[in-house]
Image (tube, helix red, strand yellow):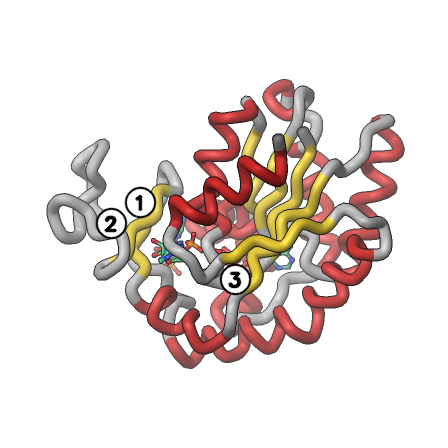
Amino acid sequence: KRLILVGPPGSGKGTQSPIIKDEFCLCHLATGDMLRAAVAAKSPLGVKAKEAMEKGELVSDDLVVGIIDDALNKPSCQKGFILDGFPRTVVQAQKLDEMLEKRGVKVDKVLNFAIDDAILEERITGRWIHPSSGRTYHTKFAPPKVPGVDDVTGEPLIQRKDDTAAVLKSRLEAFHKQTEPVIDYYKKKGIVANLPAEKPPPEVTSEVKKVLS
Ligand code: ADP
Ligand code: ADP
Ligand code: ADP
């Protein structure tokens, strides 16, 4: 399957991704994770992306289109993929169409994590992540066994620098202005499935499975 996950920051994309990935044997391409790794490594890509990310603005279309174009060539992505956090602009969606056309494949479904903005601040400010695996926890909704420690590896968890109420405001503005038109772009193609992203994770998962079965 070839899937796109779209939704505002904190809507649950990263939480559902590993479950969907394992169920259907897909690769998981999260542009936010890839960009953060580039920032941490201080690579040329990271140097270009850092300032926009810290402000909660989108990085340029060319940068993210480039990383996705490379990543789609990975052997693990040939049977199918989950795009998490890409495309986030209509230009990115159009470029993705070109990239897929070139490879003779198409997007099967766009999973739209529909949720009210009011819920997101609590989700974002309570989020803790294990950077190397992408595992996500929440102080209240999904606490690790030991506070600040990854359940699987015992390594420390971190909070993202942009997971503050102030930066969330900019990220939500970018979502409404630049990413909501992407949902309309795919609605016209008739491939959008709306998920009840406000519900607890297991209920979101069962809706995903229903939509994809
Ligand atoms: P979240 O998981 O909270 O939705 P992400 O981790 O996907 O956020 O993205 C973090 C930041 O990385 C964004 O605020 C933006 O600066 C940058 N980013 C990620 N994906 C894209 C994209 N497709 N286009 C432009 N910028 C992106
Ligand atoms: P996204 O990748 O869309 O930015 P995440 O999956 O990282 O969102 O979720 C944001 C935060 O909310 C995380 O701390 C996660 O543990 C928590 N969370 C995810 N899904 C739910 C849910 N359905 N109900 C309550 N909390 C959730
Ligand atoms: P700086 O040198 O500017 O402090 P960092 O190397 O600490 O930059 O990384 C920038 C931000 O991205 C930090 O908040 C870091 O914790 C976060 N980060 C790094 N890698 C990841 C990742 N894989 N997932 C989520 N956040 C990450």
Tell me, yes or no, if residue 158 can be seen here. Answer: no
Residue 133 against residue 124 in the figure, above or below: above
Tell me, yes or no, if residue 151 can be seen here. Answer: yes
Disc 3 Cβ-to-ligand 3 distance below 8 Å: yes
Pointer 3 local density, CA inside 10 Å: few below 14, some 14–19, many at least 20: some
Q: Quadrant of the C terminus?
A: top right
Residue 178 sits in quarter: bottom right
Q: Residue 157 — which label? A: 2
Amino acid at dot 3: Lys
Give the residue number, with chain letter if any, for mark 1.
Answer: 130
Q: Position of residue 171 (x, y in %)?
A: 54, 71
* Mark in front: 3 vs 1: 1
Indicate which disc, 3 or 2, sits on the residue closer to the N terminus. 3
203 left or right of 47 in image: left
Give the residue number, with chain letter if any, for mark 3.
Answer: 50
Helix, strand or loop under label 2? loop
Residue 109 sits in quarter: top right
> Mark 3 to mark 2: distance in Å?
21 Å
Q: Position of residue 149 (x, y in %)?
A: 17, 45
Q: Position of residue 58 (x, y in %)?
A: 62, 65
Q: Quadrant of ligand 2?
A: bottom left
Amino acid at dot 2: Leu
Residue 119 against residue 35 in the figure, above or below: below
